[in-house]
Image (cartoon, grey):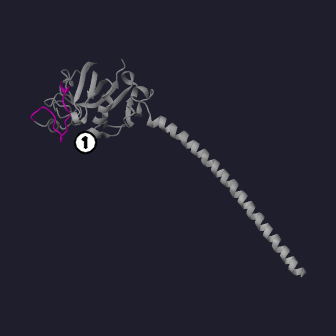
Amino acid sequence: MENIQQKQNTLEKTHQESSNSELQKIEGNTKTLDILTDTIRNMSALSEKSDKILEALFIYPDRSCRHVGKLSGRHMIHLDENSNPFEVFCEQSMFGGGWTVIQHRFDGSIDFYRNWTEYRNGFGKLNGEFWLGLEYVHQITRNRPHELLVEMKDFHGNYRYARYSQFEVGSESELYELTKLAPGSGTAGDAMGYNKNEKFSTYDRDNDTDSGNCAKILHGAWWYWRCSVSNLNGRYKNSTNDDSAMVFFNRKLDWRSMSYTRMMIRDIIN
């Protein structure tokens, strides 16, 4: 009888110890759960702060290159609440800064003999040779007045520029017509003056007023007027008499082709 009582006491003690152990585990798990809950709350708060920072940086960035700071380079801009942000190259040191580069050529590494879709959407790399894209240029220039600056160098290193006090490109339904272009100043002459009110043409979309396809004839894409006297998206080649090359006709330099061109636009502050 005494042995039975001892065994019962031992069982009760073992059960009690087991219960205490389980309770300790539960308490430990509860503490761990509380810690995890606090961690999740902190992560959620941090995520919310991060979202706000990202929103400030990318979802609502600056509306033009005038507002991005003093360093030239790639920047996100957001034109208005009805459009998506996109990346551009801003020139912040030349001619007072605030310029959005829409075309840049300097070594012939990118083929500019492209179709309509590519000229609409853009091609190349912002840190190299590129064409920003007609749709982007239209969106940038449609709501605020802009000016245009065209920089160029020939293969002998002679630099010149043409500055236009007005510049605007129509929509795709308007065939990206050069709706506004007013001469301003510069050393390169006004070879683009003939292109005003002309529609953009590529080899697969002949919208020029010439009887032929100027984009095919001049191996480029442009606002051609009778195949015109400017062709900055033409062949990259050293030439003095080939109008299919990168040319911007000037009475002093004739049809000398360019080794470097850069087209930039900037919103006008009245």
Q: Residue at x 54, y 41 (%)?
A: 48
User: Measured from the top left, where is residue 229 in percent x and y?
Assistant: 17, 27
Q: Residue at x 69, y 56 (%)?
A: 30
Main SS, magenta region, reads loop
Tag 1: residue type?
Thr
Image quarter where the N terminus lies is bottom right
23 up-or-down from 150: above or below: below
User: Measured from the top left, where is residue 123 in percent x and y?
Assistant: 30, 40
Residue extending furthest left? 211
- Residue 84 is left or right of residue 152, and the answer is right
30 up-or-down from 209: above or below: below
Q: Quadrant of residue 146?
A: top left
Is residue 204 one of those drawn in magenta?
yes
Q: Residue at x 84, y 77 (%)?
A: 7
Q: Quadrant of residue 265?
A: top left
Is residue 124 one of those drawn in magenta?
no
In-front residue for pair 242/5: 5
- Residue 65 is left or right of residue 244, and the answer is right
Q: Is residue 224 visible?
A: yes
User: Measured from the top left, where is residue 67 in percent x and y?
Assistant: 43, 26
135 up-or-down from 11: above or below: above
What residue span does the magenta drawing correspond to?
194-211
Image quarter where the C terminus lies is top left
In-front residue for pair 56/211: 56
Q: Residue at x 22, y 36 (%)?
A: 173
Which secondary structure lies at badge 1?
helix
Residue annotated with mark 1: 117
118 up-or-down from 150: above or below: below
- Residue 134 is left or right of residue 12, and the answer is left
In-front residue for pair 181/47: 47
User: Dot 1 surroundings within 10 Å: few (below 14), some, or many (20 or more)?
Assistant: some
